[in-house]
Image (cartoon, grey):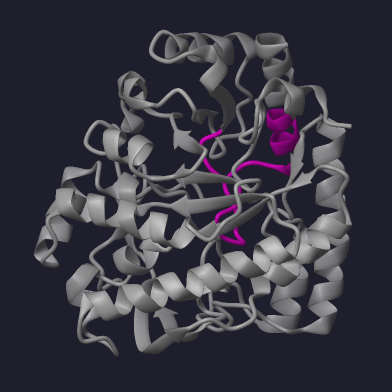
Amino acid sequence: MPTAEQQSAPRPPFRADHVGSLLRPEALKHARETFLGAQTSDQHLGPHDNAQLRAVEDRCIREAIAMQERVGLSLATDGEFRRRSWWLELVMTWKGVSADRTGTTELTWRGKDGTEKPFSRLWMTGRIEWQPSAVVRAFEFLKANTRLTPKVTIPAPIVFHMYGGGDKGVCEGYYKTPEDFWADVVAAYRTELDALVNAGATYIQFDDTSIAFLCDPRHRATVQKWGNDPDKLLLDYADRMNEVIAVVPSNVSLTMHQCRGNREGHWAAEGGYDPVADVLFNRINVHGYFLEYDTERAGSFAPLRFLPKNKTVALGVMSSKSPSLESADFLKRRIDEAARVVSLDQLAISPQCGFASSIVGNPLGQDDQEAKLARLVEVAREVWG
Protein backbone atom coordinates (compact mmCIF):
# COMPACT_ATOMS: atom_id res chain seq x y z
CA MET A 1 0.00 0.00 0.00
CA PRO A 2 1.36 3.48 -0.86
CA THR A 3 1.72 5.89 2.03
CA ALA A 4 -0.41 9.03 2.29
CA GLU A 5 2.41 11.12 0.83
CA GLN A 6 2.86 8.74 -2.09
CA GLN A 7 -0.85 9.07 -2.84
CA SER A 8 -0.77 12.87 -2.67
CA ALA A 9 1.98 13.31 -5.28
CA PRO A 10 1.78 11.55 -8.68
CA ARG A 11 5.41 10.44 -8.62
CA PRO A 12 8.63 11.42 -6.85
CA PRO A 13 9.85 13.73 -5.56
CA PHE A 14 7.55 12.96 -2.64
CA ARG A 15 5.98 15.82 -0.67
CA ALA A 16 8.57 15.24 2.06
CA ASP A 17 11.80 14.07 0.49
CA HIS A 18 15.53 14.34 1.01
CA VAL A 19 18.47 14.59 -1.32
CA GLY A 20 20.27 11.40 -0.35
CA SER A 21 23.35 11.46 1.83
CA LEU A 22 23.13 11.09 5.61
CA LEU A 23 25.64 11.72 8.39
CA ARG A 24 28.01 8.79 8.74
CA PRO A 25 27.86 7.17 12.19
CA GLU A 26 31.09 7.32 14.16
CA ALA A 27 31.35 3.52 14.00
CA LEU A 28 31.37 3.70 10.21
CA LYS A 29 33.96 6.48 10.10
CA HIS A 30 36.17 4.52 12.49
CA ALA A 31 35.79 1.34 10.45
CA ARG A 32 36.63 3.10 7.22
CA GLU A 33 39.78 4.59 8.71
CA THR A 34 40.75 1.25 10.27
CA PHE A 35 40.32 -0.81 7.13
CA LEU A 36 41.16 1.71 4.39
CA GLY A 37 43.28 4.47 5.91
CA ALA A 38 42.97 8.12 6.93
CA GLN A 39 39.91 10.05 5.74
CA THR A 40 42.06 12.86 4.38
CA SER A 41 44.24 10.58 2.27
CA ASP A 42 43.97 10.53 -1.52
CA GLN A 43 43.86 6.75 -1.27
CA HIS A 44 40.51 5.07 -1.79
CA LEU A 45 38.85 8.04 -3.46
CA GLY A 46 36.63 5.52 -5.20
CA PRO A 47 34.99 2.17 -4.35
CA HIS A 48 36.50 -0.45 -2.08
CA ASP A 49 36.16 -4.22 -1.77
CA ASN A 50 36.94 -4.71 1.92
CA ALA A 51 34.65 -7.38 3.40
CA GLN A 52 35.11 -6.22 7.01
CA LEU A 53 34.18 -2.64 6.18
CA ARG A 54 31.24 -3.82 4.10
CA ALA A 55 29.83 -5.67 7.11
CA VAL A 56 29.92 -2.44 9.16
CA GLU A 57 28.31 -0.57 6.27
CA ASP A 58 25.53 -3.17 6.12
CA ARG A 59 24.70 -2.70 9.80
CA CYS A 60 24.80 1.10 9.63
CA ILE A 61 22.67 1.20 6.49
CA ARG A 62 19.98 -0.93 8.12
CA GLU A 63 19.95 1.54 11.01
CA ALA A 64 19.68 4.48 8.60
CA ILE A 65 16.76 2.82 6.82
CA ALA A 66 15.02 2.27 10.17
CA MET A 67 15.45 5.97 10.98
CA GLN A 68 13.88 7.02 7.67
CA GLU A 69 10.96 4.66 8.26
CA ARG A 70 10.61 5.94 11.84
CA VAL A 71 10.22 9.60 10.82
CA GLY A 72 7.56 8.75 8.25
CA LEU A 73 9.32 9.28 4.93
CA SER A 74 8.03 7.56 1.79
CA LEU A 75 11.53 6.93 0.45
CA ALA A 76 14.76 5.55 1.79
CA THR A 77 18.35 5.95 0.65
CA ASP A 78 21.39 4.11 1.97
CA GLY A 79 22.72 7.48 3.12
CA GLU A 80 25.55 6.99 0.59
CA PHE A 81 27.30 5.14 3.43
CA ARG A 82 29.40 3.07 1.04
CA ARG A 83 30.83 6.17 -0.60
CA ARG A 84 33.67 8.44 0.36
CA SER A 85 31.99 11.22 -1.61
CA TRP A 86 28.74 11.74 -3.47
CA TRP A 87 30.27 11.25 -6.93
CA LEU A 88 33.62 9.46 -6.94
CA GLU A 89 32.40 5.92 -6.25
CA LEU A 90 30.57 5.87 -9.55
CA VAL A 91 33.05 7.55 -11.86
CA MET A 92 36.08 5.75 -10.47
CA THR A 93 34.46 2.36 -10.92
CA TRP A 94 34.84 2.83 -14.67
CA LYS A 95 37.92 2.58 -16.83
CA GLY A 96 39.72 5.69 -18.04
CA VAL A 97 39.00 7.98 -15.07
CA SER A 98 41.07 9.20 -12.12
CA ALA A 99 40.86 12.09 -9.66
CA ASP A 100 43.11 14.11 -7.40
CA ARG A 101 43.08 17.36 -5.44
CA THR A 102 45.23 19.49 -7.72
CA GLY A 103 42.40 21.98 -8.08
CA THR A 104 43.48 22.82 -11.60
CA THR A 105 39.86 23.13 -12.72
CA GLU A 106 39.85 26.57 -11.02
CA LEU A 107 36.83 25.54 -8.97
CA THR A 108 37.09 26.08 -5.23
CA TRP A 109 35.19 25.57 -2.00
CA ARG A 110 34.38 28.77 -0.14
CA GLY A 111 33.99 29.20 3.60
CA LYS A 112 32.30 31.80 5.77
CA ASP A 113 35.73 33.05 6.82
CA GLY A 114 36.71 33.80 3.22
CA THR A 115 39.08 30.86 2.84
CA GLU A 116 39.05 28.71 -0.29
CA LYS A 117 40.03 25.09 -0.95
CA PRO A 118 40.47 23.38 -4.34
CA PHE A 119 37.95 20.95 -5.78
CA SER A 120 39.01 17.49 -6.85
CA ARG A 121 40.07 17.38 -10.48
CA LEU A 122 38.85 14.66 -12.82
CA TRP A 123 41.29 13.27 -15.38
CA MET A 124 40.49 11.21 -18.46
CA THR A 125 43.49 8.87 -18.47
CA GLY A 126 42.10 6.51 -21.10
CA ARG A 127 38.91 5.70 -22.90
CA ILE A 128 35.93 5.90 -20.52
CA GLU A 129 34.34 2.46 -20.36
CA TRP A 130 31.61 1.16 -18.06
CA GLN A 131 32.43 -1.56 -15.57
CA PRO A 132 30.04 -3.23 -13.06
CA SER A 133 29.15 -0.46 -10.67
CA ALA A 134 29.59 -0.10 -6.93
CA VAL A 135 26.41 2.00 -7.02
CA VAL A 136 24.31 -0.84 -8.44
CA ARG A 137 25.59 -3.28 -5.82
CA ALA A 138 24.79 -0.77 -3.07
CA PHE A 139 21.29 -0.23 -4.46
CA GLU A 140 20.57 -3.95 -4.46
CA PHE A 141 21.25 -4.07 -0.72
CA LEU A 142 19.06 -1.02 -0.09
CA LYS A 143 16.14 -2.44 -2.07
CA ALA A 144 16.33 -5.74 -0.22
CA ASN A 145 16.23 -4.05 3.19
CA THR A 146 13.45 -1.44 3.03
CA ARG A 147 9.69 -1.40 2.62
CA LEU A 148 9.87 2.22 1.41
CA THR A 149 10.60 3.37 -2.13
CA PRO A 150 14.37 2.90 -2.55
CA LYS A 151 16.00 5.97 -4.03
CA VAL A 152 19.39 5.86 -5.71
CA THR A 153 21.53 8.93 -6.38
CA ILE A 154 24.22 9.20 -9.04
CA PRO A 155 26.32 12.14 -10.22
CA ALA A 156 24.96 13.69 -13.38
CA PRO A 157 27.00 12.93 -16.51
CA ILE A 158 27.67 16.61 -17.07
CA VAL A 159 29.86 16.79 -13.95
CA PHE A 160 32.44 14.79 -15.92
CA HIS A 161 32.82 17.81 -18.16
CA MET A 162 32.69 20.51 -15.48
CA TYR A 163 35.06 18.75 -13.04
CA GLY A 164 37.31 17.80 -15.93
CA GLY A 165 37.96 21.43 -16.83
CA GLY A 166 35.54 21.92 -19.72
CA ASP A 167 36.51 21.33 -23.34
CA LYS A 168 40.06 22.45 -22.64
CA GLY A 169 40.57 20.10 -19.70
CA VAL A 170 38.87 17.12 -21.32
CA CYS A 171 41.26 17.36 -24.27
CA GLU A 172 44.34 17.52 -22.03
CA GLY A 173 44.06 13.78 -21.43
CA TYR A 174 43.11 10.81 -23.56
CA TYR A 175 40.50 12.56 -25.69
CA LYS A 176 41.32 14.70 -28.70
CA THR A 177 37.82 16.11 -29.22
CA PRO A 178 34.91 16.87 -26.88
CA GLU A 179 32.63 14.87 -29.19
CA ASP A 180 34.59 11.65 -28.61
CA PHE A 181 34.54 12.31 -24.88
CA TRP A 182 30.78 12.81 -24.76
CA ALA A 183 30.10 9.71 -26.86
CA ASP A 184 31.87 7.51 -24.30
CA VAL A 185 30.33 9.27 -21.26
CA VAL A 186 26.82 8.86 -22.68
CA ALA A 187 27.44 5.20 -23.50
CA ALA A 188 28.75 4.44 -19.99
CA TYR A 189 25.82 6.19 -18.32
CA ARG A 190 23.28 4.39 -20.47
CA THR A 191 24.76 1.07 -19.42
CA GLU A 192 24.73 2.18 -15.76
CA LEU A 193 21.07 3.16 -15.97
CA ASP A 194 20.19 -0.14 -17.63
CA ALA A 195 21.91 -1.96 -14.76
CA LEU A 196 20.04 0.09 -12.14
CA VAL A 197 16.67 -0.47 -13.81
CA ASN A 198 17.37 -4.19 -14.10
CA ALA A 199 18.15 -4.19 -10.37
CA GLY A 200 14.69 -2.73 -9.70
CA ALA A 201 15.36 1.00 -9.42
CA THR A 202 12.25 3.12 -9.96
CA TYR A 203 13.50 6.38 -8.41
CA ILE A 204 16.81 7.70 -9.74
CA GLN A 205 18.23 11.12 -8.93
CA PHE A 206 21.01 12.88 -10.83
CA ASP A 207 23.12 15.08 -8.55
CA ASP A 208 24.57 18.07 -10.36
CA THR A 209 26.53 21.20 -9.61
CA SER A 210 27.37 22.08 -13.23
CA ILE A 211 24.17 23.92 -14.11
CA ALA A 212 23.99 25.63 -10.72
CA PHE A 213 27.59 26.81 -11.26
CA LEU A 214 26.43 28.47 -14.49
CA CYS A 215 24.29 30.75 -12.30
CA ASP A 216 27.48 32.26 -10.82
CA PRO A 217 29.29 35.01 -12.80
CA ARG A 218 32.60 33.83 -11.38
CA HIS A 219 32.16 30.30 -12.69
CA ARG A 220 30.77 31.53 -15.99
CA ALA A 221 34.02 33.46 -16.47
CA THR A 222 36.00 30.30 -15.69
CA VAL A 223 33.99 28.33 -18.25
CA GLN A 224 34.82 30.99 -20.84
CA LYS A 225 38.52 30.57 -20.05
CA TRP A 226 38.11 26.90 -20.86
CA GLY A 227 36.82 27.81 -24.32
CA ASN A 228 33.13 27.23 -23.69
CA ASP A 229 30.33 29.76 -24.05
CA PRO A 230 28.25 29.40 -20.84
CA ASP A 231 24.87 29.73 -22.56
CA LYS A 232 25.74 27.31 -25.34
CA LEU A 233 27.20 24.94 -22.77
CA LEU A 234 23.91 24.99 -20.85
CA LEU A 235 22.06 23.86 -23.98
CA ASP A 236 24.69 21.20 -24.62
CA TYR A 237 24.34 19.94 -21.06
CA ALA A 238 20.58 19.62 -21.56
CA ASP A 239 21.10 17.63 -24.76
CA ARG A 240 23.64 15.31 -23.10
CA MET A 241 21.30 14.65 -20.18
CA ASN A 242 18.51 13.76 -22.60
CA GLU A 243 20.78 11.43 -24.57
CA VAL A 244 21.59 9.56 -21.37
CA ILE A 245 18.06 9.21 -20.00
CA ALA A 246 16.46 8.27 -23.31
CA VAL A 247 16.99 4.60 -22.39
CA VAL A 248 15.06 4.80 -19.10
CA PRO A 249 11.55 3.24 -19.04
CA SER A 250 8.61 5.57 -18.40
CA ASN A 251 7.75 3.95 -15.06
CA VAL A 252 11.05 5.13 -13.56
CA SER A 253 10.94 8.54 -11.86
CA LEU A 254 13.92 10.74 -12.68
CA THR A 255 14.86 13.82 -10.69
CA MET A 256 17.73 16.27 -10.85
CA HIS A 257 19.32 17.95 -7.86
CA GLN A 258 20.93 21.35 -8.33
CA CYS A 259 23.62 22.22 -5.78
CA ARG A 260 25.97 25.16 -5.27
CA GLY A 261 28.35 23.04 -3.22
CA ASN A 262 27.91 21.26 0.09
CA ARG A 263 31.01 20.00 1.85
CA GLU A 264 31.42 20.16 5.61
CA GLY A 265 29.42 23.39 5.70
CA HIS A 266 31.29 25.00 2.77
CA TRP A 267 29.85 26.09 -0.57
CA ALA A 268 31.18 26.74 -4.07
CA ALA A 269 28.82 28.98 -6.06
CA GLU A 270 26.16 31.66 -5.75
CA GLY A 271 23.53 33.26 -7.93
CA GLY A 272 19.82 32.73 -8.59
CA TYR A 273 18.44 30.26 -11.11
CA ASP A 274 17.42 33.02 -13.54
CA PRO A 275 20.13 32.32 -16.20
CA VAL A 276 19.34 28.60 -16.38
CA ALA A 277 15.69 28.10 -15.35
CA ASP A 278 14.04 27.94 -18.77
CA VAL A 279 16.50 25.37 -20.11
CA LEU A 280 16.69 23.43 -16.84
CA PHE A 281 12.92 23.05 -16.54
CA ASN A 282 11.87 22.81 -20.19
CA ARG A 283 14.75 21.21 -22.07
CA ILE A 284 15.75 18.37 -19.71
CA ASN A 285 13.36 15.41 -19.68
CA VAL A 286 13.24 14.60 -15.97
CA HIS A 287 10.12 14.52 -13.81
CA GLY A 288 11.24 16.75 -10.96
CA TYR A 289 13.94 18.86 -9.36
CA PHE A 290 15.58 19.41 -5.99
CA LEU A 291 16.51 23.08 -5.77
CA GLU A 292 18.70 24.73 -3.15
CA TYR A 293 16.81 27.54 -1.41
CA ASP A 294 18.23 27.70 2.10
CA THR A 295 20.25 30.93 1.71
CA GLU A 296 20.13 34.16 -0.27
CA ARG A 297 22.84 32.72 -2.53
CA ALA A 298 20.09 30.82 -4.37
CA GLY A 299 18.06 33.92 -5.25
CA SER A 300 14.28 34.16 -5.33
CA PHE A 301 11.47 31.82 -6.31
CA ALA A 302 10.75 33.89 -9.44
CA PRO A 303 12.46 31.44 -11.84
CA LEU A 304 9.87 28.81 -10.87
CA ARG A 305 7.54 30.57 -13.30
CA PHE A 306 9.26 28.58 -16.05
CA LEU A 307 8.28 25.23 -14.48
CA PRO A 308 5.95 23.29 -16.82
CA LYS A 309 2.68 21.93 -15.44
CA ASN A 310 3.78 18.29 -15.49
CA LYS A 311 6.87 18.70 -13.27
CA THR A 312 7.50 19.01 -9.53
CA VAL A 313 10.10 20.97 -7.55
CA ALA A 314 11.24 19.98 -4.08
CA LEU A 315 12.02 23.27 -2.35
CA GLY A 316 15.31 22.98 -0.47
CA VAL A 317 14.27 25.51 2.17
CA MET A 318 15.65 23.48 5.07
CA SER A 319 19.38 23.64 5.74
CA SER A 320 21.46 20.48 5.98
CA LYS A 321 24.43 22.62 7.06
CA SER A 322 23.11 23.87 10.40
CA PRO A 323 21.89 22.12 13.57
CA SER A 324 19.16 24.75 14.03
CA LEU A 325 15.74 23.18 13.50
CA GLU A 326 13.52 25.24 11.24
CA SER A 327 10.07 25.89 12.67
CA ALA A 328 7.01 24.50 10.92
CA ASP A 329 5.70 28.06 10.50
CA PHE A 330 8.91 29.17 8.79
CA LEU A 331 8.80 26.27 6.32
CA LYS A 332 5.12 26.87 5.58
CA ARG A 333 5.81 30.55 4.88
CA ARG A 334 8.50 29.59 2.40
CA ILE A 335 6.14 27.17 0.69
CA ASP A 336 3.48 29.88 0.53
CA GLU A 337 5.99 32.26 -1.08
CA ALA A 338 6.82 29.70 -3.77
CA ALA A 339 3.13 28.91 -4.30
CA ARG A 340 2.59 32.51 -5.40
CA VAL A 341 4.75 31.69 -8.42
CA VAL A 342 3.83 28.08 -9.19
CA SER A 343 0.95 25.81 -8.19
CA LEU A 344 1.15 24.24 -4.73
CA ASP A 345 0.44 20.88 -6.39
CA GLN A 346 3.81 21.15 -8.15
CA LEU A 347 5.78 21.64 -4.96
CA ALA A 348 7.41 19.44 -2.34
CA ILE A 349 9.86 20.13 0.49
CA SER A 350 13.36 18.88 1.35
CA PRO A 351 16.73 19.94 2.71
CA GLN A 352 18.79 21.96 0.20
CA CYS A 353 21.33 19.13 -0.10
CA GLY A 354 22.47 15.96 1.59
CA PHE A 355 23.75 15.92 5.15
CA ALA A 356 27.12 14.48 4.22
CA SER A 357 28.36 14.94 0.68
CA SER A 358 31.65 13.52 1.95
CA ILE A 359 32.34 11.13 4.82
CA VAL A 360 33.21 13.97 7.22
CA GLY A 361 29.68 15.39 7.01
CA ASN A 362 28.14 18.75 7.78
CA PRO A 363 28.35 20.47 11.20
CA LEU A 364 25.30 18.97 12.94
CA GLY A 365 24.48 15.79 14.85
CA GLN A 366 22.50 12.61 14.25
CA ASP A 367 19.63 13.82 16.45
CA ASP A 368 19.54 17.14 14.57
CA GLN A 369 19.34 15.28 11.28
CA GLU A 370 16.47 13.07 12.40
CA ALA A 371 14.56 16.02 13.83
CA LYS A 372 14.88 17.87 10.54
CA LEU A 373 13.60 14.93 8.50
CA ALA A 374 10.70 14.46 10.91
CA ARG A 375 9.86 18.17 10.60
CA LEU A 376 9.69 17.84 6.82
CA VAL A 377 7.17 15.01 7.12
CA GLU A 378 5.16 16.99 9.69
CA VAL A 379 4.96 20.04 7.44
CA ALA A 380 4.20 18.04 4.30
CA ARG A 381 1.24 16.36 5.98
CA GLU A 382 -0.12 19.69 7.22
CA VAL A 383 0.31 21.44 3.85
CA TRP A 384 -0.71 18.71 1.39
CA GLY A 385 -2.93 16.57 3.59
Image quarter (top left, top right, bottom left or bottom right) of the C terminus: top right
In the rendered image, the vertical position of residue 198 relative to residue 54, given as above or below: above
In the rendered image, the vertical position of residue 245 relative to residue 275, given as above or below: below
Query: x, y (%) of residue 291?
Result: 45, 35
Could one spot residue 101 in this view of the protein? no
Image-based side of 76 in relation to 163, left or right: right
Image-based side of 259 in relation to 12, left or right: left
Residue pictured at 31% horizontal, 25% vertical: 303
Image-based side of 37 in relation to 270, left or right: right
In the rendered image, the vertical position of residue 36 relative to residue 152, given as above or below: below
Image quarter (top left, top right, bottom left or bottom right) of the N terminus: top right
Q: Does the magenta stretch include residue 355?
A: yes
In the rendered image, the vertical position of residue 198 relative to residue 348, given as above or below: below
Residue pictured at 86% horizontal, 49% vertical: 146
Predominant secondary structure, magenta span: loop
Query: x, y (%) of residue 371?
Result: 74, 29
Residue pictured at 46% horizontal, 29% vertical: 294
Q: Nearer the viewer, residue 319 or 114?
A: 319
Q: Nearer the viewer, residue 230 or 376?
A: 230
Query: x, y (%) of residue 268?
Result: 34, 50
Query: x, y (%) of residue 62?
Result: 87, 55
Q: Which of 231 and 43 is in front in this view?
A: 231
Residue 147 location, quadrant: top right
Q: Does the magenta stretch include residue 245?
A: no
Residue pictured at 56% horizontal, 73% vertical: 191
Q: Which of 253 and 170 is in front in this view?
A: 253
Could one spot residue 217 in this view of the protein? yes
**What is the span of residues highlighted in magenta in the rendered image?**
351-373
Total count of labels: 0
